[in-house]
């Protein structure tokens, strides 16, 4: 007859559940904070909104420039527009004229 010489320990029953918890914690963390995780989705959406605002500003600037170019096209050139552009490019004015310089953001 055999007798048991040592007491049975309960630590063997905790190995698999603790490994499962570790794997779930690892994958859960990366599902939220990872490159393609939930948090990244919200950051990308915020960046998309900011870039869309920049795109709208650039489109508005382009439309303004296209409008000014159309004014100088084939026979439809306005004398005031031509005069304004020539004086701006050459930095000239008449002796009896008053020149008011506006900052670039005021246009």
Image (cartoon, rainbow, N blue to C red):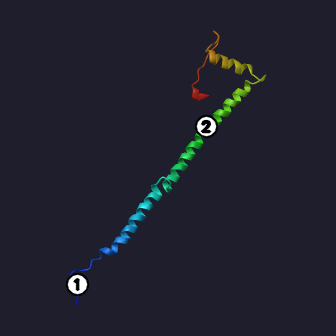
Please provide percent x and percent y for residue 42.
52, 52
Relative to residue 95, is residue 52 depicted above or below? below
Which disc, if any, is residue 57?
2
Q: Is residue 62 above or below residue 33?
A: above
Taking 101 as reference, is 22 above or below it? below
Between circles 2 and 1, the one closer to the viewer is: 1
Q: Position of residue 26 (x, y in %)?
A: 41, 61
Question: What residue appears at the point 69 percent right and 17 percent down from the top-left corner?
Answer: 83
Q: Residue at x 56, y 46 (%)?
A: 48
Question: Horizontally, is 45 left or right of 96 in the view?
Answer: left
Q: Secondary structure at mark 2?
A: helix
Mark 2 Cα within 10 Å, few/some/many (few <14, many 20+)? few
Q: Which disc number belongs to residue 4?
A: 1
| Local secondary structure at mark 1 | loop
| Number of disc labels | 2
Residue at 44%, 61% (x, y): give it: 27
Crowding around mark 1 (Cα neighbors within 10 Å: few <14, some 14 to 19, many 20+) is: few
Which sits in the foreground, 12 or 32? 12
Marks 2 and 1, Cα distance to the nearest angstrom? 82 Å
Relative to 93, 38 lies left or right? left
Q: Nearer the viewer, residue 99 or 43?
A: 43
- Where residue 24 sits, quadrant-wise, is bottom left
Which image quarter holds the N terminus? Answer: bottom left
Residue farthest to the bottom, as pictured: 1
Residue sticking out furthest to the front: 1
First in residue order: circle 2 vs circle 1: 1
Q: Is residue 21 above or below residue 89?
A: below
């Amino acid at each position: 007859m055999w007798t048991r010489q040592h007491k049975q320990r309960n630590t063997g029953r905790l190995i698999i559940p603790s490994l499962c918890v570790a794997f779930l914690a690892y994958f859960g963390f990366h599902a939220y904070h990872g490159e393609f995780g939930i948090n990244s989705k919200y950051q990308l959406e915020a960046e998309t909104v900011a870039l869309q605002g920049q795109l709208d500003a650039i489109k508005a600037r382009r439309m303004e420039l296209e409008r000014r170019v159309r004014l100088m096209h084939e026979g439809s050139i306005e004398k005031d527009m031509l005069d304004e552009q020539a004086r701006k490019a050459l930095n000239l004015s008449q002796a009896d004229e008053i020149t008011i310089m506006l900052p670039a953001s005021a246009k």
